[in-house]
């Protein structure tokens, strides 16, 4: 009995350590599950877009995708959370129209249009330059001093882009499509900056749903103005395109974005940001498997350079964000 009493505290301590480890493992497992969801789903949306626009006009496809996804998300979220302190009025809808126009219509729309001219792997690599554009905006618009690591990432990243689309030889990239693919992350970065200066709802999923709804309407107007809606032949829309559109709505917009928003609150930003250089790899692999897109030496070299540059910038910005800020006297 004395021996049992002697070792009981150690046993209890060991049990507590095991329980604490189990509690820590569960959140870690959920984080990696959500991160893997974002890796795969957002990386696969490039393939989904390619299949969807095969028989559905691109602007019309974007309109249906975001109206349906935004409508479902809005119905699920607008009555949850702080509904009294976070009221939805004209200012919030105007802000959602601006951000949705920049990030989803100009940003995602650039991707949709670019995929008509450029393989999805190359589009994904060019879209991955979004952190480069964010760094440029920080310097040019806000005059912020860039760390040496960010400057190195910028030089390396744009060198990779130049090599991908500018070098002669086999595997030449369509310049118009490449321009659309590069404009997409630039517009996304500008929209990301403006989110800090407009009156969006404080509830992230509500704000996202409103942005999607506004983007869907803008896509619809563009589809009508350009004559897409008048030219569409519904009998020629394939089952594959319809399934791909459904995949983009459910998994790309609803599941993928919800996982991303949850990660922003549950995981370090440096870990969440890794999607920026994992998604292109997923897109390249899927493009090769399902579309037979060639993996050329140019693509591998340029892709490696761009992804390395993005990693440098993400790491540098994460370090800067984690450093304590020293108050500056007036």
Image: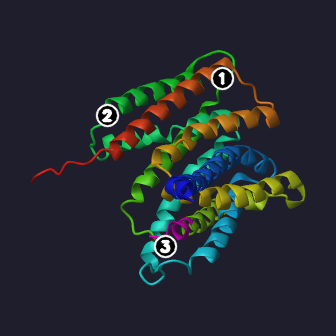
Return the residue at label 1: 172
Q: How many neighbours does mark 1 have within 10 angstroms: few (below 14), some (14-19), or many (20 or more)?
A: few
Q: Which mark is residue 93?
A: 3
Indicate left or right for 46 with 85 as reference.
right
* Mark 1: secondary structure: loop
> How much space separates mark 2 and mark 1, taking CA atoms?
34 Å
Task: State the residue at coordinates (65%, 51%).
Answer: 33
Residue bounds of the magenta highlight: 202-208
Mark closer to the chain start, 1 or 3: 3
Of 288 and 28, nearer the camera is 28
Q: Residue furthest top?
A: 169
Whether residue 238 is visible to the viewer of this picture, yes or no, is no
Q: Quadrant of the N terminus?
A: bottom right
Mark closer to the chain start, 3 or 2: 3
Q: Which mark is residue 147?
A: 2
> How much space separates mark 1 and mark 3, taking CA atoms?
43 Å
- Magenta stretch: includes residue 205: yes
Task: State the residue at coordinates (85%, 60%).
Answer: 234
């Amino acid at each position: 009995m004395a021996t049992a009493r002697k070792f009981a505290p150690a046993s209890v301590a060991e049990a507590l350590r095991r329980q604490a480890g189990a509690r820590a493992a569960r959140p870690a497992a959920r984080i990696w599950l959500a991160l893997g969801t974002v890796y795969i789903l957002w990386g696969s949306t490039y393939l989904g877009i390619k299949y969807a626009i095969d028989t559905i006009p691109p602007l019309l496809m974007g309109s249906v995708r975001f109206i349906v996804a935004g409508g479902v998300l809005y119905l699920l979220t607008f009555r949850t959370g702080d509904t009294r302190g976070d009221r939805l009025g004209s200012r919030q809808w105007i802000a959602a129209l601006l951000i949705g126009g920049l990030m989803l219509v100009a940003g995602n729309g650039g991707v949709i249009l670019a995929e008509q001219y450029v393989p999805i792997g190359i589009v994904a690599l060019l879209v991955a330059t979004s952190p480069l554009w964010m760094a440029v905006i920080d310097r040019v618009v806000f005059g912020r001093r860039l760390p040496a690591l960010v400057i190195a990432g910028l030089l390396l990243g744009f060198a990779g882009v130049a090599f991908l689309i500018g070098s002669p030889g086999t595997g030449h990239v369509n310049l118009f499509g490449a321009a659309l693919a590069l404009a997409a992350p630039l517009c996304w970065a500008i929209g990301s900056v403006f989110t800090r200066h407009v009156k969006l709802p404080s509830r992230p999923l509500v704000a996202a749903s409103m942005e999607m709804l506004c983007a869907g309407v803008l896509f619809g107007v563009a589809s009508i103005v350009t004559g897409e809606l008048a030219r569409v032949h519904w009998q020629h829309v394939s089952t594959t395109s319809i399934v791909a559109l459904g995949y983009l709505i459910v998994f790309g917009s609803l599941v993928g974005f919800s996982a991303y928003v949850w990660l922003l609150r549950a995981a370090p930003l440096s870990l969440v940001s890794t999607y920026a250089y994992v998604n292109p790899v997923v897109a390249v692999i899927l493009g090769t498997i399902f579309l037979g897109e060639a993996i050329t030496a140019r693509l591998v070299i340029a892709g490696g350079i761009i992804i390395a540059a993005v990693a440098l910038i993400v790491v540098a910005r994460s370090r800067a964000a984690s450093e304590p800020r020293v108050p500056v006297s007036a």
